[in-house]
Amino acid sequence: MVAANSNQVVSDIKEYYGKTLQQTEDLKTSACCSSESLPVYVRRVLPMIEREVVKRFYGCGSPIPPLLEGKTVLDLGCGTGRDVFIASNLVGEKGRVIGVDMTEEQLEVAKEHVDAQMKQFGFAQPNVTFHHGYIEDLAALDIESDSVDVVMSNCVINLSPDKNRVFSEIFRVLRPGGELYFSDIFAGRRIPADLVNDPVIRGECLGGAMYVEDFRRLLNDLGCCDYRIVSSRSVELGDPDVKAKIGMVDFHSMTIRAFKISDLEDICEDYGQSATYLGTIPDLPHAFHLDDHHEFETNNPVRVCGNTAVMLSASRFAAHFNVTGNRSTHFGPFECRNFGTTSQSMTTPGNCC
């Protein structure tokens, strides 16, 4: 369970998402609205998702990565299940998708549409499970350690009053080489305490937004020394009352990927390695987008740092890349843009390259 002093925050969020918000248009800002260009494999599935499920979608990005066939996927804060059902199609009948949410009203909508979605996909048996519970305590839902290939979340982690427990649980349940791929709201400074607890500011995904440097430190303390920004956009505070309260803070909606890999270093190091994408990931024949400045064109070798090399070779992407070299010879820091041990802005990755 969440900590006792967080009960009011949890209660306010349940009220906001269970009763105050009835559709996407009820939101006051663009924080929990996605304007990202959806990848082709998501665009193909989205028209198959039940209308009511899509209508009550409050995500801020498109945190559904490629290459999910046969995998076990966990969606934290799944709401009415839009992303769960998209992932359900992508993992196929041999895969599995788990949705977790604390808002019963939203889960009721998700569960009501399971049979219709499975019929739409042509699946004989459901491959999705919805749990009512807290993303801070996945053990209480019997989600075992090292059991999940991909954890995703869409503009929900910011709502948690205990983010350290959330990320601890994420890295507990991920298999070695597994991936965290999530979209959320990040802030350019720490949010004042009175605004953190404001029900509307919190419900609009602003009050609990993570200060980007605190996020970097949190992951580092959990043993994840490098994360990557896949995309980033500024958040518009359209509502005058919201802007008057918190307009001094700059917010970005970012999609992040991080891997459960023990060999990552706290800065990018040069070992003379290169990586070549083979063009074999379904729906991505011409290029693979690792992050906002790693675009691997098919059959075109690219020099990479040691961290990028291990991300590609120790994850589910390994069979789709030819990574050359090893760490036997070190050539110093990897020369890439924004070199340094900390991110310099909310569009700078967690590591140098």
Image (spheres, helix red, strand yellow):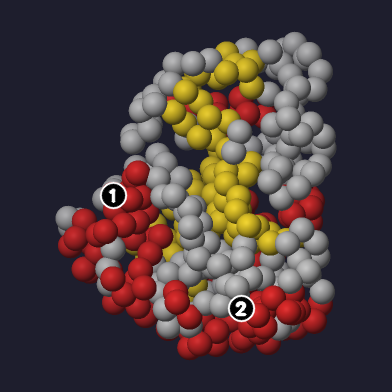
Element type where label 2 sits in the image:
loop
Q: Which mark is residue 70?
A: none
Q: Residue at x 62, y 44 (%)?
A: 229
| Depth order, front residue of 345/130 | 345
In the picture, measured across the screen, residue 332 lies left or right of residue 131, that is right
Looking at the image, is 181 positioned above or below residue 75? Answer: above
In the picture, measured across the screen, residue 315 lies left or right of residue 343, that is left
Amino acid marked by disc 1 = Arg
Q: Position of residue 26 (x, y in %)?
A: 48, 80
Element type where label 1 sits in the image:
helix
The answer to which image quadrant residue 290 occupies is top right
* Residue position for label 2: 239
Looking at the image, is 87 positioned above or below residue 26? Answer: above
- Cβ–Cβ under 8 Å for marks 1 and 2: no
Query: How far apart are the alpha carbons under marks 1 and 2?
Result: 33 Å
Q: Position of residue 204 (x, y in %)?
A: 60, 75
Q: Position of residue 277 (x, y in %)?
A: 47, 22
Q: Residue at x 45, y 77 (%)?
A: 25
Q: Is residue 144 visible?
A: no
* Residue position for label 1: 44
